Image (cartoon, rainbow, N blue to C red):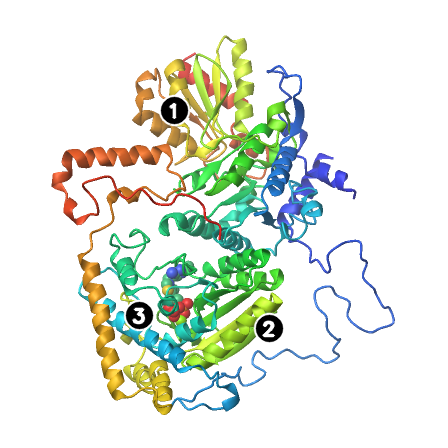
Amino acid sequence: MAALALRALRGRLLRAAPGRAGRGLGTARDFPSLEEKPQFPGASAEFADRLEFIQPNVISGIPVYRVMDRQGHIVSPSEDPQLPKELVLKLYKTMTLLNTMDRILYESQRQGRISFYMTNYGEEGTHVGSAAALDDTDLVFGQYREAGVLMYRGYPLDLFMAQCYGNASDPGRGRQMPVHYGCRERHFVTISSPLATQIPQAVGAAYAIKRADASRAVICYFGEGAASEGDAHAGFNFAATLECPIVFFCRNNGYAISTPTSEQYRGDGIAARGPGYGLMSIRVDGNDVFAVYNATKEARRRAVAENQPFLIEAMTYRIGHHSTSDDSSAYRSVDEVNYWDKQDHPISRLRHYMQGRGWWDEEQEKGWRKSSRKKVMEAFEQAERKPKPNPQHLFSDVYREMPPNLRRQRAALERHLQHYGEHYPMELYENRRRRSRSAHPNTTSTS
Amino acid sequence: MAAAGALRLLVPRGRLLPPRRGLRLSAPAAIQVTVRDALNQALDEELERDERVFLLGEEVAQYDGAYKISRGLWKKYGDKRIIDTPISEMGFTGIAVGAAMAGLRPVCEFMTFNFSMQAIDQVINSAAKTCYMSAGTIPVPIVFRGPNGASAGVAAQHSQCFAAWYGHCPGLKVVSPWSSEDAKGLLKASIRDDNPVVMLENELLYGVPFEMSEQAQSKDFVVPIGKAKIEREGTHVTLVAHSRPVGHCLEAASILAKEGVECEVINLRTIRPMDIETVEASVAKTNHLVTVEGGWPQFGVGSEICARIMEGPAFNYLDAPAVRVTGADVPMPYAKILEDNCIPQVKDIIFAVKKTLNI
Ligand SMILES: Cc1ncc(C[n+]2csc(CCOP(=O)(O)OP(=O)(O)O)c2C)c(N)n1
Ligand SMILES: [Mg+2]
């Protein structure tokens, strides 16, 4: 008996779960004995009597859906989303403002004012086109290069800056490295550094949303590099099996730091994986903001209506270095970068379109560039002047409530500063005279 | 095989069952409940109490859980609340973290904590840190639970204690029940807690019946996280343990009592935040300390207790150096005789007590 028990136990530990074809043991499957069809629970298919392996790329590649050509001409009028002028201007202004903010914060890092930065150059179309197609309450899980999504939702320049500077206005209390933005009111989940962890998390959130029956969707952004992580596989598979209202949005920008796509995978990109997981999938021109818009709009609509996951692979190009810790001249040519910067940029494509419609001209462009730069510079200068968060915040939010050991540590720090504060640059910190802003909401909100 | 039969197969070998203890007198309304049933009750009550609570993991639904902890729950609560997942720890842990971020209260079962290593990034880098990194705007209320510690006859990759691993990390709470009351009360408290909680159960205890008081049978019963429990009072030496070794300590204490040595046995119940005050008060009384755990010695639970005692007021009360009784510092061997000698046994505890008391 003991030996038997042990064997059974070990069996449970080591064995994979059996596939479950059809829930409910009560309903026995029909086995039509006369029909010559495979009955395996794991697939529904026909028999084949010729030995033939499946080619990974049977067709010459999944096509790239686009609405505009590189000169901003609508290719097929039936695909034109016919967006009103104000909306198109909003798309354009967000893309360019993002570009300007990037330039200034990148420079600021080079001058040693902030520790790190990541630009979004060349990928503005994927951010703004997708953000515009979503409802503002759809939940966003980003990777780190999606600042344009948050900007489109109205996140103010001040707060972008505050985060990068980790100053007292940072809603994140200076806890995260630059570009790890988060904003509950704008339904943008705080960025997390380990790659691809947001993918299964987004699916979990989509599952929660489905349960709440909220007619909301989740969008999950990730790079083509992150798609190689096991988490991506797990997330895709779960989204399909849990039937979640989620749009997976892959920014395929050609590189994962220095790793080109040719070393990242051998199949036909990321979209080709979709069918394997049972995901509705499409590849779009990520530098065509209307193509991104159309694909996201329809994927979002159907994801919510049908509780079905969708996968969008947006082809684009990372024009900037990976981050301020990277020098991409070591692994790609200036010509290559120049091609995308000069010949196939999402911002210039949309500008061509707007000029073609008579909605924009050189003068407006000049004026807007000037005023947007001024806005960014103002926010930047303000951020730099702001004090640092109160050191007392070192201890809050480790738990929802502050446990005694942390309270003791906080009190010890306070005592120390009372005695020796003069030896520290206390004037750089927020509210050091009185007790810090302790009115932080400590209640759980579950919306 | 019938469900009941299959269940019996999962109950550990007889040699590992601690003897029923007649140490305490039963209150009239107390009943005997196994740890498995206590956990099942806790899940059932909390699923019923709060619509946001759901259980997910491998085989937790239709199969009732690899160790039958979730028996009957899928039938009662259905696919929406009890979710069988594909074999993908990092996947379903990520799902649980995301669901918690979006307002649900997942209970994430690892078939055993050994497999939680596949998902460690989700637990440490996402669950434990998101509340802090989001400045309190994204709480992650979630329970990671499953069997932990040495099992029987399943060797290195299936027999190890993760208390020190998880106990190391701020942002997590870590509980480790011994008795049925611990199991029920701590699981309920963990589910109601607004933080991520790691609950380290012990497979070898699942089938063990413990007395459960009338109070503990109530739906309102919770065991506060962060409070240790004195299981037996004594004056000569303090024994501190968590999980299954608590039983070993009680056995050692009753043997030693016959020799005139009165041990105070503290059931830690929570690894993080650690109730060091209870240990300090006891050491101030007994002047001797022995820690007992199934895990490895280096950076272990016992190491932490010793360090905290050394740093605090109780240090001056120690009449002898504290002694740690731990698992042997090797991966768990398969051979039974080696395995037996790798985990703390009652004789090891008695030896340590005598050493520290110099008798
Ligand atoms: C788990 C993990 N491994 C490695 C890294 C280091 N890393 C940060 S970004 C990056 C490249 C990601 O490339 P991709 O997903 O294509 O996104 P992109 O930067 O192109 O937007 C790597 C390897 C990390 N953050 N997390
Ligand atoms: Mg990339």
Depth check, front residue: A355 or B351: A355
Amino acid of disc 2: Pro
Query: Mark 3 highlights which residue?
Result: A119
Which quarter of the figure has residue A357? bottom left
Extreme residue toward the left, this view: A422
- Residue A76 in percent (x, y) is at 50, 90
Residue B78 falls left or right of residue B248? right
Amino acid of disc 1: Glu
Q: CA distance from mark 3 to mark 2?
A: 32 Å
Circle 1 SS class:
helix
Circle 3 SS class:
loop
Q: Mark 3, chain letter? A: A
Under 8 Å from ligand 1: the CB of mark 1?
no
Residue B333 falls left or right of residue B138? right
Query: Mark 1 highlights which residue?
Result: B277
**As displayed, is residue A415 above or below residue A399?**
above
Residue A327 falls left or right of residue B41? left
Label 2 environment density (alpha carbons within 10 Å; few <14, some 14–19, many ≥20): few
Q: Are marks 3 and 1 in contact (CB under 8 Å)?
A: no
- Residue A319 in percent (x, y) is at 32, 77
